[in-house]
Amino acid sequence: MSGKPVICVIDGAGYYFRAFFAIRQRLSNKKGLPTNAVYGFALMLKKIAREMDPQYMVIAMDSREKTFRHDMYGEYKAHRPQMPEELAEQLPYIDQLINAFRIPIVRLPGWEADDIIGTVAFQGAQKGFDTMIVSSDKDMLQLIGPGVKVYDPMKDKTLGEAEAQERFGAPPDKITDVLGLMGDSSDNIPGVPGVGEKTASLLIREYGDIEGVLAAAGRIDKKKLSENLIQFAEQARLSKRLATISTEAPVEFDPESWRFGEPDVSALRSLYAEMEFDSLLKELAPAPAKTVERRYKLVLTGDEYESLISALSAARLLAVDTETTSQSPTAATLVGISFAVGEGDAYYLPLRHSYAGAPAQIPVEKALARLKPLLEDTAKPKVGHNIKYDMIVLAGEGINVSPIGMDTMVADYLLDPTTGHSLSKVAMSRLGEKMVEYSEVCSSGARQITFDMVPVDVAANYSAEDADMTLRLYDLLRPQLEQGGFIKLMDEVETPLIETLVAMEMNGMLVDRELLGELSIQMGDDIRYLEETILKAAGEEFNINSPKQLGEILFGKLKLPGGRKTKTGFSTSQDQLEELSALHPLPQLVVEYRQLMKLKGTYVDALPRMINPRTGRIHTSFNQTVAATGRLSSSDPNLQNIPVRTELGRKIRQAFIAPPGHVVVSADYSQIELRLLAHFSGEPVYLEAFSRGEDIHAKTAAEIFNVSPAFVTSDMRRIAKTVNFGVIYGQTAFGLARELKIPRAEAQRYIDGYFKRHPAIRKYIETVIAEARRAGWVSTILSRRRPLPDITAKNQIARQMAERNAVNTPMQGSAADLIKIAMVSIHRRLARESWRAKMILQVHDELVFEAPEEEAGKLAAMVREEMEGAYKLNVPLVVEVKSGKNWDEAH
């Protein structure tokens, strides 16, 4: 959306009808009450809450009374079938469910839910809000406009003006004109006889609106169409009025009463128990085991500050949380710090609150001078939730927080890597405590303020609660890590990795702003050239960014084979376009056009804006708690998605440079996942090949094509490489055939031949999947676990995906384990041995460094030593190290 606060308004009736019909199997409790609609509605609400994370939410419901539309047209909705009795029985429980989620319901006598939704969207736009309408009703598309979008939960798709245009062939403000002509059988809106959606769209595009169509009716060539438009003109106008959603319903616009927060867990628990929803009951947060008295103290005076210092000095460990002006730690200014020293015992020390009337605060230098030795005291562990952020912020103030006792966000991630790990979610799920949300303190959207504008008493309760919950989670989660067998992984890898990532994020990467500017101009020229070439190849003007229009060109005009129809038109996915590239030049041109547009917008134009003015560098954030496999990810910017093998990807990497007198050094594990496959499976051919230092892809190629290794061509090796890695990712013959552009039967021969030659790998894969079915999870070489709840699912697609993850995770996750071990060791050596070189980036199996030219050779040897010695496998680990003036040269 636009960054404004978002109101999520749900079409309640549409939701419960779809919930009822989506779950076909009969669900009922022991009393015989049908429950499928309630269950489906609960799942849909959970999905909206989880994926959209709305700030405000309201549900619009129809009332039983007739509406103004019935006065306009007595037959309105006259043919609607009666609600199924099994659904009607569940409506009171759906109301209970909504109330337990603490979502307001709006019903207005004489008004439809559509009109309530339209009014909320209209008033929201007037008052500075964005609106997300949750509905699968096509009529809602007429409401789309600035600040208003529609989310279709059945298609799991957000619809804006372009999608509305594709659906009706007309912009949102003309949809009622289309509906007026075509009518709507579901609502018994008559329209004009003989006019369907396609004809209506064509007429509106040609004549502008319904009045323009009716005025031109006598000039239309098709006689019957002309006669019907003239004869049924008033019926068309009536139909438009019936189809038009009102924005004038008497809705009391009160977004604060619609603010979305945590549900009433007790009420949900009671309802789920009555409905016998065992799986949903298990997901609910536990009831608080005990009530903890909160003794939160605001520190403003000298005496209060001395009490804080005394409490911190006596504490066994410190839970720390910082409040700042930015989500980016390298750009943030410290506003205040909270500490917890025991359950319910927490303090907030404001430092830079600067709103009008803010009280005098302890001077920053004086406050931090006494805190510095306590935060750096190696005998006193420090605990945080995403403590990496706090460490970077405090490092900016000259305080090097040490040692890390535990990061509760990482701890929760190790215990279950498949869920969210924000402090409020973890506190609710593990402690049963509902926390104050950041948006409640700082608002959101256009009205959002920075934390230095928050009143100190409000800030104290909010921030002290963060520290308090973090300390309580530490006491809860550490024993669970020990019981689950994760404590070694936590203490020896993940926790020291935090210190490594702190240094890497603070180091940042230097980028060539001038080169990016030149590349932006060049890519802009290339995009314009491609646009012209695409339109010329198509033989007509069309919107290249419209999948529907592109599909009509490819499969309608050009008659290319294999068009896969979806509800919105032909599929124009990248896979589809690549399949068609051998038949016509246009699909490949569109692939290149899309790649250029994405790379230009995501990197070339965006990177200069991300340069930190304080450091002149880009500081990406490394995320430990995102990927279920254990891999690190990066964000702001995401440097893992820059293409490695394309010319465009290379040009973007060339913009990441070393300063004068320095070089970029890149160290990359060679075929790490295949080496791990050899280690786990014990496959003799792989073990022998890796032990001898042979090229495993060339060896596989020689086997596949039954030739001597000396006669393996680059194409043969490419095919073998695809087969080798395809095994890890559970690739089917269909997928392999598509990637290699070969017949499926040939791809199947490659796969069958591969497993025939490597029976130990087949046995390993079968064993892993069988064990995953038994245990419900798989693990990595360091005992990191990934739950696989769908491994026994009845749905074939979900089950097969879980099986692929079962095979892939031990390799990909173990590779992540090994590079994390290496990162920690290298970081410690860089510090211990006083290197001037810096570790600046990690991308999958690659580490990137910035080093003085005179250190580059020694650094390469040291890094290779640590990476290759990270773990003892049954095959040697091999690392390739290169250097250059930029990341591309070093890669």
Image (cartoon, rainbow, N blue to C red):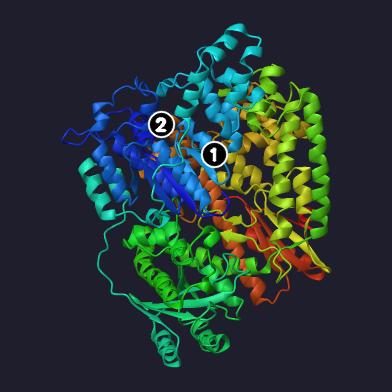
Q: In this view, does 365 lie to the left or right of 601?
A: left
Report the front residue among 247 and 635: 247
Give the mark nearer the N terminus: 1 vs 2. Answer: 1
Q: Is residue 666 left or right of residue 802?
A: right
Which residue ends up furthest to the left in the rendered image? 31
Q: Can residue 114 be seen in this view?
A: yes
Q: Which amino acid does label 1 sit on?
A: Ile
Quick check: 616 left or right of 421? right
Between 768 and 38, the one nearer to me in the picture: 38
Residue 277 place in picture, x, y as percent: 27, 42
The quarter of the displayed image where residue 618 is located: bottom right
- Mark 2: secondary structure: loop
Q: How far apart in space, not on screen, are marks 1 and 2 (Cα)? A: 35 Å
Q: Which residue is drawn at 49% across and 45% down?
A: 122
Residue under label 2, please give it: 795
Amino acid at the residue labelled 2: Asn
Of the numbered discs in the image, which one, if any, rests on residue 428? none
The one of 800 and 511 positioned closer to us in this rendering: 511
Few, some or many residues within 10 Å of mark 2 (<14, 14–19, 20+):
few
x and y, in percent, of residue 596 in the image: 74, 41
Please tell me which residue is depicted at 29% across the width and 45% down the height of the picture. Answer: 97
Say few, some or many: other residues with alpha carbon within 10 Å of mark 1 (under 14 / 14 to 19 / 20 or more): many
Q: Measuring from the top left, give residue 717's x and y in whole percent.
A: 72, 35
Which residue is pictured at 71% across the width and 34% down the height?
591
Vertical position of residue 805 compared to residue 71: above or below: below
Q: In this view, does 290 lie above or below 760?
A: below
**Which residue position is annotated with label 1?**
144
Give above or below for 409 relative to 780. below
Q: Name the residue: 59% across, 23% down.
A: 201
Regarding mark 1 in the picture, which secondary structure is present there?
Answer: loop
Residue 160 at x, y percent in the picture: 57, 39
